[in-house]
Image (tube, rainbow, N blue to C red):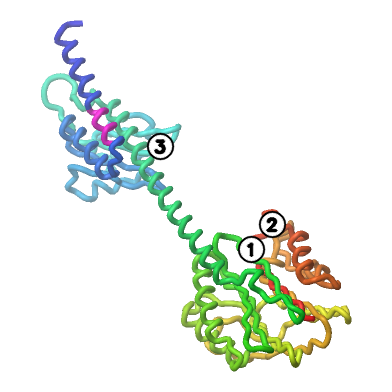
């Protein structure tokens, strides 16, 4: 090999190494996508004298992430699916091609793990001087450089996506903690010679749309409720938090259940703009009169079990769900006289809506069987949880599950 050829080859190698070094340094400096593309463009335009350059990258769909030297916007409108996916190798564009692609000279596919991930399309290459154009000599190098750039940009995207997911995860964890603060813990529920209340809460996702509560209305009267927002996720959790604040502000000894439901309906309509609704069971119990008053607003029917009579009563009197209609046309208040020890089991639909081989099952027979005995309401709920395999991550469960159990002595 002559000295002249050796020097030429050395210059070529030096150029390639220098270019790769600059790009590698840029990647190590954690530059943004825009800054990496700027350096990439500079190498192709200034060092290789490429006049027109366009770079398409595949994310969820094909997007043009870089265009340079193109004055006619129509020349950017290349249909990648139809015009480029057939290119598996570096190819010259045919002059007879009657598409936007004919405005360019060369297509360079970037393939990673056997899949097209990008296309570099160049035009107006430097063809002055004798011999082969310097650009054409560097096509394989351009392909290698493009591959490095595309992989680096994809890593940036994945890293940013992971940061967003981590931030979202922390936000959901915080929302879950705040939501748990709104729902009374079992140790805070009454347990005395008149009444024993226990509960179970199991959100399907980080945040849920279920809610239950207990409120001491007076010395001789208590209020309780259980409810469920239509839908799932953050929007359901936010609406439920708003509902909890309204219910606690409105539910007093003085207000009737009828007026309470009407006011709650107005508040939910205002908060949800008719996009969601809430099912609600709300009750009052007076220790002196032993009268239970309730309204079931579209909720799963709680079960009242009278221990001595060994009888089950479904608490079904009420109305449509809260927030379904501007005005609720008819509200029926239910009433039961509790003259003997009794248990009340309230629950949300996640407990009974289970997936089986035939679709969604809504059987309550399991719950009825677990309740129909003289054991404590706490034992009954533990038995339900065990038999339904709720804490075993059963695939049949696809919704939030809340249970409120009340034992009256």
Q: Which residue is mark 1?
A: 202
Q: Where residue 84 sits: x, y (%)?
A: 35, 39
In three-dimensional space, the C-alpha distance between marks 1 and 2, rounded to whole angstroms, equals 8 Å
Q: Where residue 302 sits: x, y (%)?
A: 73, 77
Dot 1 and dot 2 residues touching (CB under 8 Å): yes
Q: Which mark is residue 116?
A: 3
Kind of element beneath mark 2: helix
* Horizontal side of residue 164 vs 307, given as left or right: left
* Horizontal side of residue 160 vs 181, given as left or right: left
Q: Which residue is mark 2?
A: 391
Viewer-proximal residue among 196 and 30:
196
Q: Which residue appears farthest toward the left when viewing the image?
A: 129
Relative vertical location of residue 268 with respect to residue 233 in this rendering, above or below: below
Answer whether residue 211 is magenta in the image: no
Question: Residue placed at 68% from the left, 91% from the top?
Answer: 332
Earlier sequence position, callout 2 versus callout 3 = 3
């Amino acid at each position: 090999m002559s000295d002249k050829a050796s020097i030429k080859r050395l210059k070529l190698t030096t150029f390639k190494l220098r270019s790769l070094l600059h790009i590698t340094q840029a990647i190590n400096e954690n530059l943004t996508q825009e800054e990496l593309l700027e350096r990439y463009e500079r190498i192709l335009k200034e060092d290789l004298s490429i006049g027109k350059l366009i770079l398409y990258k595949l994310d969820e769909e094909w997007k043009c992430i870089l265009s340079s030297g193109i004055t006619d916007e129509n020349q950017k409108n290349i249909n990648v699916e139809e015009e480029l996916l057939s290119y598996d190798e570096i190819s010259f564009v045919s002059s007879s091609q009657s598409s936007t692609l004919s405005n360019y000279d060369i297509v360079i596919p970037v393939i990673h793990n056997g899949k097209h991930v990008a296309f570099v399309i160049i035009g107006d290459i430097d063809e002055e001087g004798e011999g082969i154009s310097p650009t054409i000599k560097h096509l394989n190098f351009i392909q290698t450089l493009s591959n490095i750039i595309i992989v680096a940009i994809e890593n940036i995207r994945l890293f940013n996506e992971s940061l967003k997911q981590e931030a979202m995860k922390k936000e959901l964890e915080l929302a879950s903690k705040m939501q748990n603060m709104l729902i009374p813990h079992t140790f805070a529920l009454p347990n005395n010679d008149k009444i024993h209340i226990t509960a179970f809460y199991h959100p399907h996702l980080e945040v849920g749309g279920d809610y239950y509560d207990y409120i001491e209305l007076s010395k001789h009267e208590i209020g309780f409720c259980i409810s469920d927002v239509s839908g799932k996720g953050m929007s359901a959790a936010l609406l439920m938090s708003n509902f909890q604040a309204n219910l606690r502000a409105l539910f007093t000894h003085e207000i009737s259940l009828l007026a309470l439901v009407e006011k709650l309906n107005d508040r939910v309509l205002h908060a949800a703009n008719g996009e969601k609704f809430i099912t609600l069971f709300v009750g009052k119990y007076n220790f002196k009169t032993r009268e239970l008053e309730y309204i079931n607003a579209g909720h799963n029917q709680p079960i009242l079990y009278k221990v001595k009579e060994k009888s089950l009563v479904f608490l079904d009197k009420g109305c449509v769900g809260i927030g379904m209609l501007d005005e609720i046309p008819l509200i029926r208040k239910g009433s039961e006289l509790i003259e003997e020890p009794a248990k009340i089991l309230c629950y949300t639909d996640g407990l009974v809506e289970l997936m089986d081989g035939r679709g969604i099952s809504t059987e309550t027979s399991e719950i009825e069987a677990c309740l129909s005995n003289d054991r404590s309401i706490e034992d009954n709920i533990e038995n339900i949880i065990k038999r339904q395999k709720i804490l075993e991550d059963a695939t049949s469960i696809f919704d939030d599950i809340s249970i409120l159990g009340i034992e009256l002595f």
